Image (cartoon, grey):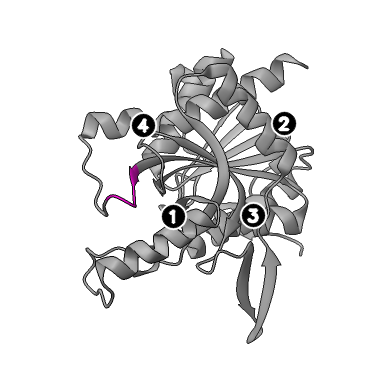
Amino acid sequence: MKEDVLYHFGLGTGTHNFPTMFGDVKFVCIGGDTSRMKTFISYIAGQLGIAGPGNEFPNICASTDRYVMYKAGPVLSVSHGIGMPSASIMLHELIKLLHHARCSNVSLIRLGTSGGLGLEPGSVVITKQAVDATFKPQLQQMILGKPVIRSTVLDKELAEQLMECGKELNQFNTVTGNTMCTLDFYEGQARLDGAICLFTQEEKLKYLTAAHEAGVKNIEMESSIVAVMCNQTGIRGAVVCVTLLNRLQGDQINLSREALAELELRPQILVGHFIKKHLSKK
């Protein structure tokens, strides 16, 4: 292509100098919520001693309302919305951005929230592999009308490095395990509190218990596409999510706004420690 327009970012190779803007990026941190990613860039900038213009970090994607993107030194913070379709669109354009910027040795980490299985709320799960609703480490995508199955195993070395950081911090329970990635928040996650529910409490608990016995530590909606996109493009990928409840004990999140805000900080504290530790070795 003479010009590559990253439509959902409001960026393009004909209008922006990608190597100048993004060529030094080594860490890309993504998350669903726009405000959380703005909070993260301010946090990591403070950890790295990086000051923004007027102590603010402008939204690089301000010309569109699809996603937000912030940059502090070698760290890029990008929102991906809810679910795999939204995350997939963002990841396609993000990976093209990194290619056009000629970035190398990039680590991509999703920071998120999730429902835990057999874990106390506030536990941080580092995903070994994302699994589907049948507990298999794969994602089936329909391409040209045909099913294509791809692996959802994440980078083992990166997961181990993040786990080591969790041990060093020793601030909250940090574990590794499988993450079940679903297509929706209610029926797909065996919730009884949606608008539609055609199964019983007993059936729900039987299914979630089977998931737990299969090594599933938490449930969310983006890890599989993160794993697939990273595997297909050779980028080191990881998923770090805090649990907001134990799904074996209930379906609804009953945390105060203050408690929820504190728990949501835990993945960024862990990843911030990892980034700072990695850069200090340079």
Callout 2 amino acid: Asp
Instruction: Give the distance between the C-alpha atoms of the residues marked 1 and 4, in whole angstroms.
Output: 26 Å
Instruction: Give the distance between the C-alpha atoms of the residues marked 2 and 1, in whole angstroms.
Output: 24 Å
> Which span is picked out in magenta?
245-249
Question: Relative to residue 66, is residue 249 drawn left or right?
Answer: left
161 in the magenta segment: no
**Which label sits on residue 66?**
1
Along the line of sight, the residue nearer the viewer: 36 or 217:
217
Q: Earlier in the sequence, mark 2 or mark 4?
A: 2
Instruction: Give the distance between the C-alpha atoms of the residues marked 3 and 2, in whole angstroms.
Output: 23 Å
Would you name the residue on which mark 4 appears? 263
Whether residue 79 is situated above or below residue 39 in the rendered picture: below
Whether residue 15 is situated above or below residue 232 in the rendered picture: above
Instruction: Give the distance between the C-alpha atoms of the residues marked 3 and 4, in whole angstroms.
Output: 24 Å
- The residue carrying pointer 2 sits among few (fewer than 14), some (14 to 19) or many (20 or more) residues within 10 Å by Cα, namely some
Q: Are marks 3 and 1 in contact (CB under 8 Å)?
A: no
Q: Is residue 241 visible?
A: yes
Q: Which of marks 1 and 4 is nearer the N terminus?
A: 1
Instruction: Give the distance between the C-alpha atoms of the residues marked 3 and 1, in whole angstroms.
Output: 22 Å
The quarter of the picture where residue 136 lies is bottom right
Residue 144, given in percent of the width and then of the height, sits at: 66, 84
Question: Relative to residue 11, is residue 65 drawn left or right?
Answer: left
User: At 46% from the left edge and 29% from the top edge, which residue is drawn?
Assistant: 173
The residue mark sitting in front, 1 or 4, is 4
Callout 4 amino acid: Leu
Regarding mark 4 in the picture, which secondary structure is present there?
Answer: helix
Would you name the residue on which mark 2 appears? 24
Callout 3 amino acid: Ala
